[in-house]
Image: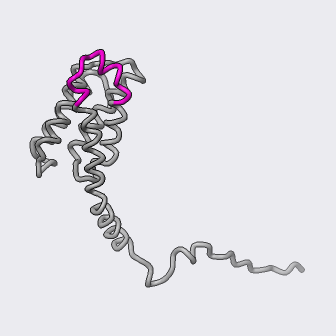
Amino acid sequence: MPVAEIFMPENRLGAILGGASDPTSARLTKAAERRVDTLQSGLRLHVAGNMQIVRALARQSDETLLAESHALGDAAQAICEVAGAAGLYALGEAARGVFMMVAAHAAQGIWRPEALKVHMNAMIMIDAEPDPDEASGRHAVILEELQGLRTRIGIAR
């Protein structure tokens, strides 16, 4: 008659997920928020540097804008990646729109420099005039209009 063996696998998570002294998700979240707060000034400097590129290109001709579209897309992407953590949600969303428009040119051949400049000028205005109530203030209206513009010219969300 065969003998049954009882096998108890090693608990590999035991070393990671410990006991009562381990930090809770609430404590880990608070620590992460404090860390982001300490990084905010650096993130804002990063955004400001990329906004210089947007400002410079917003004044250029359509031909120059097309030639520099890759640099514009890179700057817009850099802004939208960190703007939320820097407390610049509306700016990040407007930058995301610029990035989407540049990407649409590369992927679909959609090139609408006038609409792109509207987005860039919106970024400049949002950056210059902070709105403490971004969720329902004038920035929300601007972002909604930019989204509508992108939809009308065939740039998907």
Magenta stretch in the rendered image: 56-71
> Which residue is outermost to the bottom?
20
How many discs appear? 0
Q: Quadrant of the N terminus?
A: bottom right
Q: Is residue 2 left or right of residue 75?
A: right
Between residue 61 and residue 146, name the one nearer to us.
Answer: 61
Residue farthest along the right direction in this orientation: 1
The percent position of residue 93, horizontal first and vertical second, equals: 25, 40
- Tell whether position 46 is magenta: no
Residue at 24% over, 29% down: 56
Work out whether residue 38 or residue 134 is closer to the camera in this orientation and state it: 38
Residue 127 % position (x, y): 17, 41
Q: Residue at x 34, y 45 (%)?
A: 81
Query: Which secondary structure dominates the residues rendered in magenta?
Result: helix
Quarter of the image where one finds residue 98: top left
Which colour scheme appears in the figure? one colour
What is the x, y in percent for residue 101? 31, 27
- Magenta stretch holds residue 66: yes
**Relative to the observer, which residue lies in front, 56 or 103?**
56
Residue 26 falls left or right of residue 91: right
In the displayed structure, 106 sits above or below 129; it is above
Q: Report the quarter where the C terminus lies.
A: top left
76 relative position to 118: left or right: right
Q: Position of residue 150 (x, y in %)?
A: 26, 27
Image quadrant in which you'd find residue 47: top left
- Identify which residue is drawn at 36% across, 30% down: 71
Residue at (28% x, 33% y) in the render: 53
